[in-house]
């Protein structure tokens, strides 16, 4: 069987909740400590066996493309200054994977399934990962690798979807998974933002998916839905009519950077993993809270 060698990362959003910071700079290029959000996603898929990364960007912005290409002027400056450690960091970025850059054009419908539509010509008859660019994960085993391991054991499925258990009092904010009757890991549908007491489960889906190529024919024919947007959940629900879809509760932590508060929380979680920062940062926070 074939495991995913390609990954699509959706980085075409406008980042309106971070304006004016995202007026020119894509939200996915905002840093978590010393790396942009999107680089963490690239490193996750590469660690999961991916060789070809497809980045779907918005029109009018080339910043993400420039980040993953060689920067000869910067490399010359670092070499001249003798900053070899930083030189190695910069030179390693373009070598992470083979990169393709696709523009999500204004003629396309808006929505979280549109990056798949934009990438169609780069996808063959093979499984692939799909990631939302503003979702991040912390896990000993990369989350995409976890999905691949599920798929390896169940190669007949149409998709494997990452989920995380959430406190019941916050489920109304998310898409909550409804399982097929009599199963604990087979997808039936998503209930978007359920009312309190009407939640079909306690797990929510987020931006980590492994799709078989069977999703592509559905994406090609997919019609816009709520708010005239092209919704991924509509495509998944259509796929579930003919194919088994498995739900994988991740071993690790899902972190979102979709708004300012969660962006800051995510930054703190990553600081806690940095031996060179965590102790001094904790000391600073504790002392500052006393004031």
Image (cartoon, grey):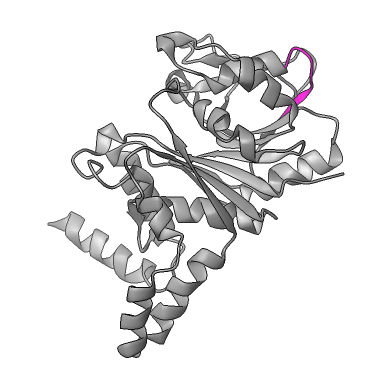
- Image quarter where the C terminus lies is bottom left
Give the quarter of the image for residue 170: top left
Above or below, 68 relative to 82: above
Give the quarter of the image for residue 220: top right
From the viewer's perspective, tell me whether residue 56 is left or right of residue 233. left
From the viewer's perspective, tell me whether residue 52 is left or right of residue 111. right
Above or below, 98 relative to 274: above
Task: Give the camera-side residue of 168 and 57.
Answer: 57
Task: Give the camera-side residue of 31 and 247.
Answer: 31
Task: Give the camera-side residue of 250 and 66.
Answer: 66
From the viewer's perspective, tell me whether residue 239 is left or right of residue 21. right
x and y percentages locating residue 155 in the rendered image: 85, 36
x and y percentages locating residue 209 in the rendered image: 63, 35
Q: Is residue 242 covered in magenta?
A: yes
Q: Residue furthest left?
A: 291
Magenta: main secondary structure? loop
Q: Is residue 185 visible?
A: no
Q: Is residue 283 visible?
A: yes
Q: Name the residue: 46% across, 15% down.
A: 193
Above or below, 272 relative to 169: below
Task: Give the camera-side residue of 147 and 230.
Answer: 230
Q: Name the residue: 57% across, 19% down.
A: 233
Please provide the residue range marked out in magenta. Answer: 240-246
- Image quarter where the N terminus lies is top right
Above or below, 285 relative to 19: below
x and y percentages locating residue 186 in the rendered image: 75, 23
Q: Is residue 238 covered in magenta?
A: no
x and y percentages locating residue 29 in the rendered image: 36, 51
């Amino acid at each position: 069987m074939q495991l995913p060698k390609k990954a699509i990362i959706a980085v075409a959003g406008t980042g309106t909740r971070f304006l004016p910071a995202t007026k020119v700079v894509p939200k996915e290029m905002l840093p978590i400590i010393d790396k942009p959000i999107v680089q963490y996603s690239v490193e996750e898929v590469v660690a999961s066996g991916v060789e070809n990364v497809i980045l779907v960007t918005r029109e009018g912005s080339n910043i993400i493309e420039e980040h993953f290409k060689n920067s000869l002027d910067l490399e010359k400056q670092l070499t001249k200054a003798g900053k070899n450690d930083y030189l190695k960091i910069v030179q390693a970025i373009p070598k992470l994977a083979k990169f393709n850059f696709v523009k999500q054009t204004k003629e396309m419908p808006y929505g979280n399934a549109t990056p798949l539509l934009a990438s169609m010509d780069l996808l063959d008859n093979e499984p692939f990962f799909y990631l939302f660019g503003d979702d991040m994960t912390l896990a000993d085993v990369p989350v995409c690798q976890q999905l691949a391991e599920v798929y390896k054991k169940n190669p007949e499925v149409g998709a494997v979807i990452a989920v995380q258990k959430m406190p019941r009092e916050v489920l109304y904010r998310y898409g909550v998974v409804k399982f097929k009757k009599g199963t604990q890991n087979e997808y039936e549908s998503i209930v978007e933002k359920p009312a309190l007491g009407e939640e079909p489960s306690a797990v929510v889906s987020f931006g980590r998916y492994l799709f078989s190529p069977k999703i592509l024919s559905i994406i090609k024919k997919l019609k816009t839905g709520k708010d005239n947007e092209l919704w991924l959940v509509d495509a998944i629900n259509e796929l579930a009519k003919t194919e088994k879809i498995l739900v994988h509760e991740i071993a690790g932590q899902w972190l979102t950077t979709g708004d300012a508060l969660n962006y800051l929380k995510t930054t703190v979680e990553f600081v806690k993993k940095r031996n060179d920062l965590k102790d001094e940062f904790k000391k600073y926070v504790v002392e500052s809270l006393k004031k």
